[in-house]
Every structure is written in C-alpha cells, then in structure tokens.
Image (spheres, rainbow, N blue to C red):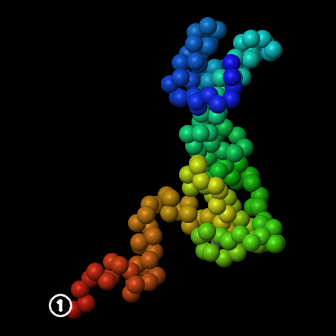
Amino acid sequence: MAQRGRPPVTEEALKARIDDYCARYDVAPNEKGVPPFPAGRRETRQHREWITLVKAHTRLRRRMGGLCRRCDNPAAPGGILCEEHESLAAPAIAPADSKASCFVCGDGVAGTAVQELQGDTRSTPELVHRGCADVIALAQRVGPELLDRVRQYLWPETSPRSRRRPLRR
Ligand SMILES: [Zn+2]
Ligand SMILES: [Zn+2]
C-alpha cells in the first residue's frame, strides 16, 4: 500500500476502520474514540493495526484543528497548547535581535515575553506580547462587540456609534 499521496482520511472512513478493528478484536473504543492499547500484545499484527489507527486518529484531529502541539488534548481557544501545557509553558522570550513585531500592538517583540497565537489551524502562528495575548483571549470569549464597546469607551468622539447620534435636535 502506498503511504504517500493518499487522500486524507475522513472522519467516517476512520470510524469505519475503528469499528472494524473493535469487532475483530472484541474491544470497545475508549472515550477518545480509539481502541484501547492492546496490552500484552506488543509487536503483534493487532498492535501494528492499533498504532496505525491511533496515528490516523491523531492526524485527523490535528487537521480538524484545535489540538495541543504537545499532546492530544484540545488546544485552548486561539492558542496552540492545551490549558495544562499553556500554564506549564514558561513565557517564551523573543530573541533580543528579533525583528518581529506583535500583531496586536505593533511594537517589536525583541527581548520580551511572547506567546504564539494561532487564529485558525491553517495560518502560521502569530507572535504577540504576553499581555497582548490577553486582549485576544478576552475578545475571543466576549465576541466582536467587545471591540465596539472598548472603542466607544476610549474614543467616544471617533466611534461610529456616537457619530450616528444626532448632534442637536
Ligand atoms: Zn497539551
Ligand atoms: Zn503587543
């Protein structure tokens, strides 16, 4: 079987393969939807099939997005790590000669604590200051109207909403 250039496995196709495996070996998938590790059956055909299924399952979930870079748990919203790894991760310090700038505030990131953000799984991670990452996280939680409210609060004169208000009656 050619391993290269195959079309990516679909969720249904993988489900069917997992069901088939489970029926043949008389096991049930665990809560992640993959068959349990075939304990005591290392290096057997079953073990090899199990590895293939688990790898396909991980690849599929990674492709569908939202998997932690370091484990198979879901990544925190907007992040590339799960909450556990996110909290464990020491703030990365951008190199002192880094020319990159934070995509939130636009300032350079050289020598500062930064975090990688990934808007959608296909885009390349963006580098932002640690504090600036909080803005993203907050906006993600509250939704786009957060930005309108902040704009209205900080710059009422220039906000589109106040301009729409009649100046005199
Ligand atoms: Zn993780
Ligand atoms: Zn910033």
Where is mark 1, residue-wise? 169
Answer with the quarter of the image where residue 107 lies.
Answer: bottom right
Q: Split into 4 quadrants, where in the image is the N terminus?
A: top right
Question: Residue 68: horizontal and vertical position, in percent?
Answer: 66, 44
Considering only vertical position in the picture, is 56 above or below 153? above
Answer with the quarter of the image where residue 74 lies.
Answer: top right
Answer with the quarter of the image where residue 104 lies.
Answer: bottom right
Confirm if mark 1 falls within 8 A of ligand 2. Answer: no
Q: Residues within 10 Å of mark 1 (few under 14, many from 20)?
A: few
* Amino acid at pointer 1: Arg
- The residue that appears at 65% across and 23% down in the rendered structure is 53
Q: Split into 4 quadrants, where in the image is the C terminus?
A: bottom left
Q: How many numbered badges does the structure rendering display?
A: 1
Asked if residue 52 can be seen in this view, the reply is: yes
Asked whether, in this view, residue 52 is left or right of residue 163, the answer is right
- The residue that appears at 69% across and 52% down in the rendered structure is 86
**Residue at the limit of the structure toward the bottom, as seen here:** 168
- The residue that appears at 81% across and 67% down in the rendered structure is 95
Question: Residue 47: horizontal and vertical position, in percent?
Answer: 74, 16
Question: Residue 54: horizontal and vertical position, in percent?
Answer: 67, 26
Secondary-structure class at tag 1: loop
> Which of these two is toward me, 168 or 55?
55
